[in-house]
Amino acid sequence: MTSPQLFTGRDLLCLRGGRLVFQDLDFQLAAGGCLTLVGPNGSGKSTLLRLMAGLLKPLRGTIAWNGVALGQDPEAHRARLHYVGHLDAVKASFTCREMLAFWAGLRGGVGVDAALDAFAIDTIADVPGRFLSAGQRRRLSLARLVAAPAPLWLLDEPTVGLDRASVALLEEAIARHRAGGGRVVLSTHIDLATPGGELLDLATFAPVEDDQDGTEDAA
Amino acid sequence: MLRLILRDLRLVLRQGSDATAALMFFVLCVVLFPFGVGPEPNVLTRIAPGVLLIAALLAALLSMERLFQGDFEDGSLELLLLSPLPAEGVAIAKVAAHWLVTGVPLMIVAPLLALLLRMPADQLGLLVGTLALTTPLLSLIGAVGAALTLGARRSGVLLPLLVLPLYIPVLIFAAAGLDAGLSGLSPRPHLLLLGGMLCGALVLAPLAIAAALRAAHE
């Protein structure tokens, strides 16, 4: 309401398996923006992306799209996001084209061939999933992004398994998406060129270790 | 939703194993009974309804464990839950696909097996009708258990424990209906009760499945 056209998170606190992952985390992302999540393993990058997708609910704080909290309209939020997680959802007996057509079809997308081209998998379009390499699976997973347009991309370490040429294709796809007003949130351990993008270091939101309390008790 | 049903059906056609295993189990189970209890027509006719229903129930249970497992493990289920399709829609589509590949073939072979067990031919219509009410119920109730045990380590043990008590009312009324038919009474009240259960399950099971699937992804 106060900040229209923004994808925002306020005062987020998340608990996983009884452990505090991050607290007091804020972010905001305008149209065309890109937020890169960095931080050591276990700092909550995947958790934050799952929060943004609505798969998890924050223990405290709100995530909102144009001022409307995700919980109020989860269906509308799902319709506007693409999520690429660690798993590539590849079925052994389906060809790349069939899988892509299915996922695009669920979102009413039609650009299957264009998406196959965008990630250079047009040559293996009719190969069944069981013969795909890890990098090819990942590219197929990324091709979903292009096959059915959605304004928000949530990419959890999208570069895993990709070769240098494929990373360039991904950068290109992200740039094109942002030029069209799309937003991207991604976590990565390698340098992915996102010109004009912001960096969010999750280590800065890690809970303060209770060393202090310990020393005080001892004293 | 239709798209998801078609995809599941195609997946089964390509891979085959689960659905055919359930059907084979059903056939073998029933065929073995005459060898076990002897070929006396009276005995066979008497136990035919129970044998057919229990075999159908176990066959449904056998194929149930894999219902969400494959999609859960490769990340498809996560994507389905994040698709614009409501989670309840995903649940209904998965159950519908399961019923089409296990329940329907079972209904088709059941009359043949019933003849093998010396069930009177005029009761076959009733048998198919009862199975038409029973098999979707088995799929719906079983899917709730399958969704709840998703991600659990010993889901193969947990699933029957959870689901079998819920299957018992279905078994009782389906068997009572068939028995009533065999002894010349009207099976109508039993079938109406089964129909009532099916209506209830059609509404409630997808809600429970959807909640369980969401919980599995937390």
Image (spheres, coloured by chain):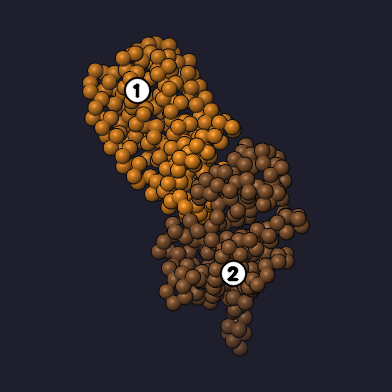
The label nearer to you, 1 versus 2, is 2
Q: Position of residue B139 (x, y in %)?
A: 42, 37
Q: Residue furthest bottom?
A: A219
Q: Given the image, on which type of amino acid does mark 1 rest?
A: Leu
Q: Position of residue A174 (x, y in %)?
A: 64, 61
Q: Could you say which quadrant of the image residue B107 lies in?
A: top left
Q: Given the image, on which type of amino acid does mark 2 rest?
A: Gly
Q: Position of residue B121 (x, y in %)?
A: 34, 13
Question: How far apart are labels 1 and 2 at the CA level?
Answer: 62 Å
Relative to B87, is A174 above or below? below
Please indicate whether residue A6 sits to the left or right of residue A146 in the image: left
Colour chain A appears in? brown
Please indicate whether residue A17 sits to the left or right of residue B127 in the image: right
Relative to A112, is B194 above or below? above
The residue located at (60%, 84%) in the rendering is A212
The residue that label 1 is drawn on is B127
The residue that label 2 is drawn on is A33
Chain holding disc 2: A
Q: Quadrant of the N terminus of chain B?
A: top left
Crowding at dot 2, Cα within 10 Å, few <14 / some 14-19 / many 20+, comes out as many
The residue located at (55%, 31%) in the rendering is B13
Crowding at dot 1, Cα within 10 Å, few <14 / some 14-19 / many 20+, comes out as many
How many labels sit on residues? Answer: 2
Residue B217 can be seen in this image:
yes
At mark 1, the secondary structure is helix
Colour chain B appears in? orange
Q: Nearer the viewer, residue A122 or A19?
A: A122
